[in-house]
Amino acid sequence: MKKQNIIIIGVVAFVLAVAVGYAIFSETLTISGTATAEGNFDVQFTSVGTPTCVGFSQTCDANTLTQISEDKNTLNITVNKLEYPGAYVEIPVTVTNVGSIPAILTTIEETGLTTDPSVKVSYTGLNELKNQQVAQNGTQNFKVKVEWDQDSEQSSSEVQFSIKLNYKQIEAQ
């Protein structure tokens, strides 16, 4: 019986020693915190420069030929009848990233463009801007040209259309 008591006391002492040793060498580490990501994604048409008009007898100014939409995401262009084949109106445009998130131009949407084959719309400098980053307060400049086809035998009519540039957020590396 004495031997059994000694064994029980030994086991209890061993368990207590292990428990005390574990308690001495263990710690609890608690970490708490909050992470917030905030940003504003906003690329807008901000200005239209002085147009170049050749063979266009109407008023040749930005206010007559263009209108930036209220949300500043669409540029509306109206060019009344051009005078002769080869006549054109070229309009310089500036787009600004007024948001806080860098952006990249992905696509160009034209809507309302007539199917008049005698009038062509082209862009100078816009394709070069695709896939280029526009930082906060950064700008991009390009030109929109509305031209009566040089080889056309049809008369031109009024051209009205809208341009919307689609941007996307730059993805993290």
Image (cartoon, rainbow, N blue to C red):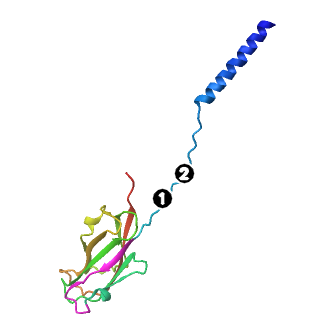
Instruction: Indicate the secondary structure of the residue bearing disc 1.
Output: loop
Q: Secondary structure at mark 2?
A: loop
- Foreground: 65 or 171? 171
Question: Which residue: 58% across, 35% down?
Answer: 27
What's the residue type where badge 1 is placed? Ala
Q: Amino acid at mark 2?
A: Gly
Location of residue 77 by image quarter: bottom left
User: Which residue appears at 28% of the width and 66% of the height?
Assistant: 129
Please state if 128 lies on the left or on the right of 162 as rendered: left
Quickly name the residue at label 2.
33
Q: Where is residue 150 shown, x and y percent of the image?
A: 18, 80
Residue at image coords 30%, 70%: 139
Between 17 and 154, the residue placed more toward the observer is: 17
Instruction: Read off the residue under disc 1.
Output: 37
Q: Which residues are magenta?
A: 43-59
Q: Is residue 73 magenta?
A: no
- Against 11, is 37 above or below? below
